[in-house]
Every structure is written in structure tokens, then in C-alpha cells.
Image (tube, rainbow, N blue to C red):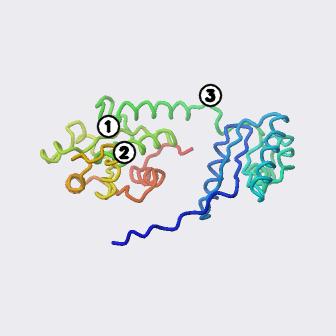
Amino acid sequence: MSDTKPPALPPANRTVFFVSDGTGITAEAFGHSVLTQFDLKFKQIRLPFIDTIDKAYDAVRKINEAMAVDGKRPIVFSTLVQTDLANVVFKSKGMHMDLIQTFVAPMEQELGIKSTHTIGRSHNIADSEEYKNRIEAINFSLAHDDGQSNKNLSTADVILVGVSRSGKTPTSLYLAMQYGIKAANYPLIPDDFERGRLPSALPEFKAKIFGLSIAPERLSEIRNERRPGSKYAAIENCRYEVNEAEAMMKREGIRWLSSTTKSIEEIATTVLQEIKSDVKIY
């Protein structure tokens, strides 16, 4: 087996700014989607809450300083709603990718109305039912993490099962935070394999169960980071647990996937498709 590693990416020599008069999360999410298309490293800086002229000029100073240090134009992803602030930042020496001008202005023309030009509207939580649903879902997922509680499982949107460290907890929390999905998760452990049955609280909710598996070699690596040299992390034990878990899921007719090469976002999207949830995606 070759131990040749892929060539390392060159040192970061291009600075990227995410500039917003709100949290900057939207600009950063869009920017990351674009940047991942390029096999380069970038120095990334978020400049949130740029909501005054003074802060806008300070952002310009930072962008121009990066230009002087790097010798290359910084890339600026911005979601500045207020035109006067955007106009100031546009004077900087960056290469500008402005989401408001790119998307909102054409929509105003197409729809024949002006937008609200409200700062942080997508993250406004004052009277948001969706926000409340997400908080409830996060609390539910935390309370039902790793089989801690059997209470109110009937209200769960999905119940994730799989061996320890197969990705259940991060997927549960991602589903809760992004989509307001109430996700419980249960570990499948050697006791379950010896009995040949799912944990006792789960059979009546089988329609809500979705399984995660993982390659034994990857599982061993992950467990060794947590408990190096233990039986828990030994490759033989990992092979046993994964084989038994997959056999149980097949026997019980549980839908499942391998998380080995998938991101949390990919796993969550597959889970959403499989459970055919009718929750609003936002």
C-alpha cells in the first residue's frame, strides 16, 4: 500500500474578506462555496457589523493593508445593505463580490418593487416562529444525544442510530440548527449486538430511524484520537461493531448510509430526503 500523500497546498498568499452590516454569516457561507472550487489556501477575515461610515472606512483600511502586504488584490465578499456603506467599501483596493447588488437589484427590477433594505433581515429573530422551532429542536437534540433520554421520542422527526463516533451527534445538531429538525440519536453497542435487537425504546419508532455506518479503518482512527491504544479503538473491535451494526440495520429494514467520505451537510441532506420531512427548509 502506497503511503504517498497528495501534494500540500501552497501557503496562503491571498486574503479574503467577508464584509457585512450584519453577522457576516451569509457572506461567509457564499464565499466559502465559491472558494472551495479552487485548490488554493486563503487567509480569511470576517468583518461583521459594519454599520457606520467610520466602520466602513476602517474596513477599507484593513482591505488596503492586505493589498500592501500580499501584493495582490484581496477578494471581498460583501452583503452590505446600506448603499452609502457599500459605496465606501467599494473604494477599497479589493476585488468585490457584492451579493446585494448582484442579486437584490435585479430582483427589484424583475418584481417591480423596491426591497426593504433591512439589515440582517434573514437573521431577524424578534418574532420568528422558525427561530423558535430551531431552538426547540436544538434543545431536543441535546436532551436526546447518545441515548440520554427516551422521553418524547414520539415527537422526534428522526432517530439516528450507529456505532459510537460514526457522526450521529454532529448530524443531529446540524439538522436542528439548520432545519429545525428534532433529531434524537442512539449508539449501537455490543450489548445490542449480543441481544440481536435494537435498544428497547426504539422498535415502536422504527419508521423514524435512520442509520449511520463508517469504514472500520476510519472509525479506528477517530477513536484512537479520543482513547489511544484502547480496545474501544482497536481495528478488530471496530470491524466487529461496524459489521454487527450494518447486519442489524439490514435485518431491521433500517435505511442507512456510510459517513466515511461524506460531510455533515451531505449526511444531513440525505437524511432529509429519506425521511421525506415536510418541515420548511430555511
Out of 5 and 136, give the one closest to the viewer: 5
**Element on which disc 3 rests:** loop
Dot 2 surroundings within 10 Å: few (below 14), some, or many (20 or more)?
A: many
Q: Is residue 88 above or below residue 126?
A: below
Task: Name the residue type under label 3.
Answer: Asp
Dot 1 surroundings within 10 Å: few (below 14), some, or many (20 or more)?
A: some
| Chain-order first, disc 3 or disc 2 | 3
Which of discs 1 and 3 lies nearer the camera? The answer is 1
Residue annotated with mark 1? 146
Task: Name the residue type under label 2.
Answer: Lys
- Residue 150 location, x and y as percent? 28, 31
Location of the C terminus by quadrant is top right
Residue annotated with mark 3? 127
Dot 3 surroundings within 10 Å: few (below 14), some, or many (20 or more)?
A: few
Question: What distance separates the C-alpha of mark 3 from that of mark 2?
Answer: 31 Å
Which of discs 3 and 2 lies nearer the camera? The answer is 2
| Chain-order first, disc 1 or disc 3 | 3
171 left or right, relative to 61:
left
| Residue drawn at x 23%, y 36% as measured from the top left | 201
- Residue 278 location, x and y as percent? 46, 45
Location of the N terminus by quadrant is bottom left
Q: Which mark is residue 130?
A: none
Residue annotated with mark 2? 168
Task: Name the residue type under label 1.
Answer: Asp
Question: What distance separates the C-alpha of mark 1 from that of mark 3?
Answer: 32 Å
| Chain-order first, disc 1 or disc 2 | 1
153 left or right, relative to 172:
left
In the rendered structure, are the residues bearing label 1 and label 2 in contact, judged by CB atoms less than 8 Å apart? yes
